[in-house]
Image (tube, rainbow, N blue to C red):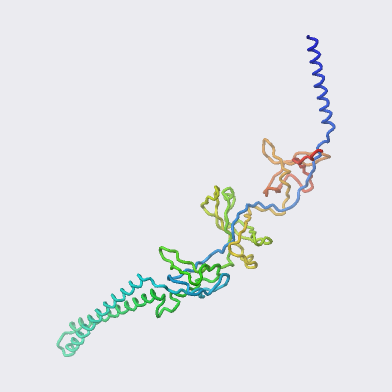
Amino acid sequence: MKRTKTIIILVTIAVLFTVSMYWLYSKNIENPIVYTTEQASVGTIVKKTVATGSIVPKEEVLIKPNISGIIDEIYVEAGEVIKAGELIAKVKVVPNVSSLNSAKNNINSIRTQVETARLAFENQKSIYNRQKELFEKGVISANEFDNAQLSYDQSKQRLKQEEVSLMSANQNYDIVKTGTTSGMGASANTEIRATVSGMVLDVPVKTGNQVIEANNFNDGTTIATIADVDKMIFEGKVDESEVGKIKEGLPLEITVGALPDKTFQAELDYIAPKGISENSAIQFEIKGTMKKNDTSQTFIRAGLSANASIILAKAENVLTIKEALVQYDPKTQKPFVEIQIGDQKFERREVELGISDGIDVEVKSGVSKDDNIKVWNQLKQPTN
């Protein structure tokens, strides 16, 4: 029994030894890994983040009517360039019955006051004439005559004030009824004119549409939108993870979807202090003023979608290597590369890195342009 166990143990040891020797032999006959190398190059590294948005005018002016009514005629179309004061549209007033009755009642009330003031004036005028005759004959004193003249002048002035009030009430009645009045011209309310110079971006109303004047309770109907298309800005949003990296004054490179072959320069001049939640992510609004030279040579339509590359850092004509060539010490976390010193022989060399764009990284010191750098994480060729 003991002899049988001994034989089994010896056979097992022999088999394991044979397998081990075969495995070692197989490893020895495999082709060794051959590492390739790459060299550093001189180039430009740009570190940036991207914001999506659109191109809009810096200032848009909404033209609204001064009185409610119906559009009688429109004189401009979207795309036209107009100057301040030019006629945009004409409004036909539809009088409000309540306002019309109120204005008419006000006229009747003031007419009564005018008649009362006229009667008082005629009375004071008669008294004044009698006192004047008596004063000239020496019957009354100068003091009594002065009092009569004062009362006469006061009644005359009061009559003039009431007549002015009546004229104003009549003008108000005409404005409520027709939108204009004598002495103010037809442009008082019925003619809508441009308040600024620029291009007409939109005319949202048509002839026959009813419009409402702007007041404390209503924004009013927009008849036209005017903007200076030579002053355009980029409006976009950045994620909360990127907003901490940007600041006012950074340059922007803007690409417009409709103009893929052109790049426009701008400057970041606004970052919203408060974020807005969109699709479970916090977004911050940004604005950048575009350079006038770019917008003057190419017409950019308002509202075009665009992407803005915010330049966080830029290094020109610097030594760069692929970021995949860099290794990091597991203890110190310092970067290093392996430089070829012979046939498949490499030595470790620590490097000082600068900015990175995610693909290439700036090398400040540690390697030269002629060094062959080991591609340490290269992929093995698939075996058949």
Please state which of residues 182 and 377 is positioned toward the viewer in this rendering.
Answer: 182
Please state which of residues 246 and 141 is positioned toward the viewer in this rendering.
Answer: 246
The quarter of the picture where the C terminus appears is top right
The residue shown at (81%, 21%) is: 15
Q: Residue furthest front?
A: 208
Please state which of residues 233 and 30 is positioned toward the viewer in this rendering.
Answer: 30
The quarter of the picture where the N terminus appears is top right
Please state which of residues 353 and 185 is positioned toward the viewer in this rendering.
Answer: 185
Measuring from the top left, give residue 365's x and y in whole percent: 72, 46
Measuring from the top left, give residue 74's x and y in whole percent: 51, 74
Res. 129 image quadrant:
bottom left
Label count reads 0
The answer to whether residue 220 shows anywhere in this view is: yes
Q: Residue furthest bottom?
A: 137
Judge from the rendering whether residue 321 lies leftward or rightward of residue 304; answer left or right: right
Q: Is residue 17 above or below residue 258?
A: above
Measuring from the top left, give residue 233's x and y in whole percent: 58, 61
The answer to whether residue 154 shows anywhere in this view is: no
Res. 300 image quadrant:
bottom right
Q: Is residue 240 above or below residue 169?
A: above
The residue shown at (29%, 76%) is: 108
Measuring from the top left, give residue 10's x and y in whole percent: 81, 16
Res. 19 image quadrant:
top right
Judge from the rendering whether residue 347 lies leftward or rightward of residue 164; answer left or right: right
